[in-house]
């Protein structure tokens, strides 16, 4: 009975509310966890003290505040749906809050590190860059130029290139929201180079902008691996991943412009609270300048 209700809720989310496959899979895992914790007890019979006990059990297993908040969000949404259908008399998750966890700031590359990462690889023995390196250059430049999420970049199609020459592409973000984002000069050059050679890999009917060796859409895992490989080849002393380039884009633009609203729009954040984390990164930059420059802040040697 419990599993049937979960399946019905997820089907509604996918069909009527058009939630992404990634979101549906995450909700399914979170609700499967609730079924396991409840053992043989029906989910419709659970009360607040059950949820609090399950939360404590998960916290004891090592789950942090952010993970528990995501799990509670899924459970809360499920019970709201049950309430609307008259399947459950109350929402036992309402009012239950996860433990607070330290807020970790996203790590961003310095401008010098970003420039090093985006330096094109040397051409091969025949003088022309490998087609995969040309593709990768366009991918990495686009990440840093426009602050795209990994799923957004992976989902780009050829028809998303609204006007490359003018520096505009159309991106499908979270909750199926579309936005137009600017593309910098270096990224436009890299995109033009890739589009000029894309036919070497992609068939005429392939819609994906970025494809792999077999001509099909490049997977997110492969994009992650190619970026990691590039960072290792260049000897960068950290694990570089796509979201780090998004963080770097946001913090560098904010440091230069101070325009938080513009950064919010370009990142596709629904709330400016999500963007405000980059003001902390900017403060870290200012603090380093202060420590190095202010006469009363310099450390004695």
Image: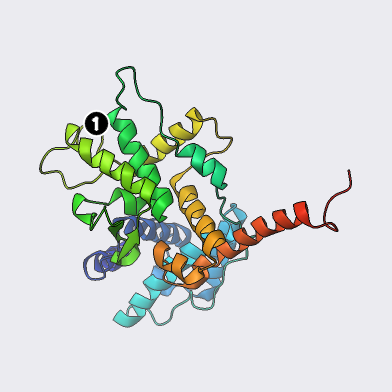
Residue sitting farthest toward the left = 205
Looking at this view, is 163 or 245 the one in front? 163
The chosen color scheme is rainbow
Q: Residue at x 38, y 46 (%)?
A: 186
Determine the residue positioned at 35% across, 37% down: 136
Name the one closer to the observer, 187 or 102.
187
Tell me if residue 160 can be seen. yes
- Residue position for label 1: 213
Does 88 sit above or below residue 152?
A: below
Judging from the image, what secondary structure is the residue with disc 1 in?
Answer: loop
Above or below, 248 against 93 in this view is above
Q: In the orientation shown, which residue stands out farthest toward the right?
A: 300
Q: Is residue 40 left or right of residue 179?
A: right
Q: Quadrant of the C terminus?
A: top right
Does residue 72 appear left or right of residue 31 in this picture? right
Q: Residue at x 10, y 41 (%)?
A: 204
Q: Is residue 1 visible?
A: no
Residue 112: name its quadrant: top right
Q: Position of residue 106 (x, y in %)?
A: 56, 54
């Amino acid at each position: 009975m419990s599993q049937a209700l979960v399946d019905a809720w997820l089907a509604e989310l996918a069909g009527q509310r058009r939630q992404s496959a990634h979101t549906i899979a995450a909700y399914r895992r979170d609700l499967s966890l609730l079924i396991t914790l409840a053992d043989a007890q029906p989910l419709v019979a659970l009360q607040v003290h059950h949820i609090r006990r399950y939360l404590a059990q998960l916290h004891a297993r090592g789950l942090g505040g952010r993970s528990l908040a995501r799990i509670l969000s899924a459970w809360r949404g499920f019970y709201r749906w049950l309430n609307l259908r008259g399947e459950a008399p109350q929402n036992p998750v309402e009012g239950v809050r996860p433990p607070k966890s330290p807020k970790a700031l996203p790590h961003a590359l310095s401008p010098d590190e970003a420039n090093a990462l985006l330096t094109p690889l040397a051409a091969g023995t025949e003088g022309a860059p490998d087609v995969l390196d040309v593709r990768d250059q366009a991918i990495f430049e686009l990440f840093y130029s426009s602050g795209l999420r990994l799923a957004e970049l992976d989902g780009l199609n050829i028809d998303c290139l609204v006007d490359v020459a003018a520096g505009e592409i159309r991106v499908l973000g979270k909750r199926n929201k579309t936005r137009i984002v600017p593309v910098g000069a270096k990224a436009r050059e890299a995109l033009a180079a890739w589009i000029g050679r894309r036919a070497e890999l992609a068939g005429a009917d392939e819609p994906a902008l970025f494809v792999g060796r077999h001509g099909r859409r490049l997977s997110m895992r492969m994009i992650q691996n190619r970026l990691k490989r590039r960072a290792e080849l260049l000897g960068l002393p950290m694990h570089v991943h796509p979201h780090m380039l998004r963080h770097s884009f946001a913090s560098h633009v904010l440091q230069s412009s101070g325009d938080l609203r513009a950064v919010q729009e370009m990142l596709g954040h629904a709330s400016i609270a999500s963007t405000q984390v980059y003001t902390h990164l900017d403060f870290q930059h200012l603090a380093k300048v202060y420590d190095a420059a202010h006469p009363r802040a310099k450390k004695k040697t």
